[in-house]
Image (cartoon, grey):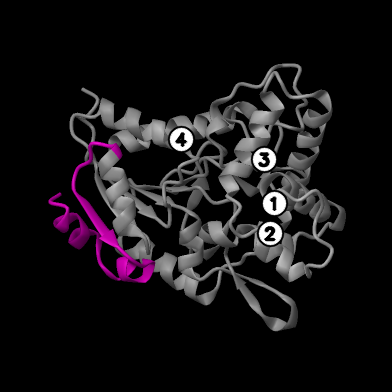
Amino acid sequence: MPGAIAGRKVLFFLGAGASRGAGSTAPAQGGARVPSPTQSEFWDVFLRFCPTGSNRRLIQSFLFRYFLGYIRVPARLSSVDRRRALRHVDVEEVFTFLSERVRAPSTSPQFRSYALRIWRALLAEVGQVFRRFEPTYRSRAIYRSLLAHHVRARDAVVSFNWDTVFERSLPKTQRWHYEGLDHQARSLRILKPHGSVNWQLGDPITISDRPEVPVIVAPTHLKFVETTPAADSSSHLGYLDQSQEIQAIWSEMETQMRQAKALVFIGYSFPVADLYFSSVLRSVLALRDRPPALVLVNPDATSIRARLEARFSLGAVVTYFDLETYVRSTRSAVLGILGL
């Protein structure tokens, strides 16, 4: 039976809020430190740290034209005001728009070429921007506490983040590997279904400190779109079929979700645009004899819980409003609250 093996493990999910909540920062001018961005700060931080001026101007012009309705970027605005004006532009909507326009039959060849230019510019800069975000004393303390108090040998960690803050915060004595890319026995499995800034796109995907083309699966509901053999291999737009490894990682994540007695979502807000993951969750719930328990660790946990309970048939749910409070508890205490 599909649900017969459920109950052996806990599966942890890390969203953008996990890096932020753990205290990850990037160095900025004047000795300042910039926190890891969430949705509302993404474009502000991305354009601030985007190192290639031509790409930054191209992306900024695209966002002002297609998401704010300006024919051109207002010259009167300072760079700070330009970034601030883009704060409410939804990241997932941008990637979905690019994916749709590239694939839509009605798209003109000129605009298709333009959309591909924007995607290549984004891809070139994402790796450089998110490699700037480093583990800190606080992130190391929090993630090591998570490891000690909550994670056990049979568990796995799914990170939706492009950054490598979690991996680099682990103690040097901790054995771990990227599931789907390499394997180590008796090692913590880390699955990164959205790719990573330290993965080099290729056949096969390889791990590299500074890849020329990082593996980025775009935050869009069009993840499942199949690319054609004639498509430009350097412009995958983040589709799941860009490599066998990415497909295998998503498949393994779904297997882990079917087997887990509890799913712990840390800093993941279930964005509306990520319909593909929602469909995975719905499939998992349908195949199990009983739904898994859920732990939501998020400042907005109450409203996220209400949205999920309105959409899915869930088991017990417990909420925490910050990561530090959650990691200070214990695995047995949390599972006890959930009745497991």
Q: Are marks 1 and 3 in contact (CB under 8 Å)?
A: no
Q: Which residue is situated farthest in the left direction here? A: 339
Q: Are marks 2 and 3 in contact (CB under 8 Å)?
A: no
Say which label, 3 or 4, has the lower sequence index.
3
| Residue 209 seen from this side | no
Q: Which residue is mark 2?
A: 46
What residue is rendered at 63% in x and 29% in y? 243
**Structural crowding at the residue carrying mark 2, measured as other residues with C-alpha within 10 Å and reported as few (<14), some (14–19) or many (≥20):** some
Say which label, 2 or 3, has the lower sequence index.
2
Side of 184 where 154 appears, left or right: left
- The disc labelled 1 sits on which kind of residue? Val
**Structural crowding at the residue carrying mark 3, measured as other residues with C-alpha within 10 Å and reported as few (<14), some (14–19) or many (≥20):** some
Element type at mark 2: helix
Q: Is residue 50 magenta?
A: no
Q: Single out the mark in the foreground, 3 or 4.
A: 4
Q: Which residues are magenta?
A: 311-340
Q: Single out the mark in the foreground, 2 or 1.
A: 2
Q: Single out the mark in the foreground, 2 or 3.
A: 2
In space, the residues marked 3 and 4 are separated at their CA atoms by 28 Å
Element type at mark 1: helix
Element type at mark 3: strand
- The disc labelled 3 sits on which kind of residue? Thr
Q: Single out the mark in the foreground, 1 or 3.
A: 1
Q: Which residue is mark 4?
A: 275
Q: Is residue 338 magenta?
A: yes
What residue is rendered at 73% in x and 56% in y? 128
What is the number of the mark on residue 314? none
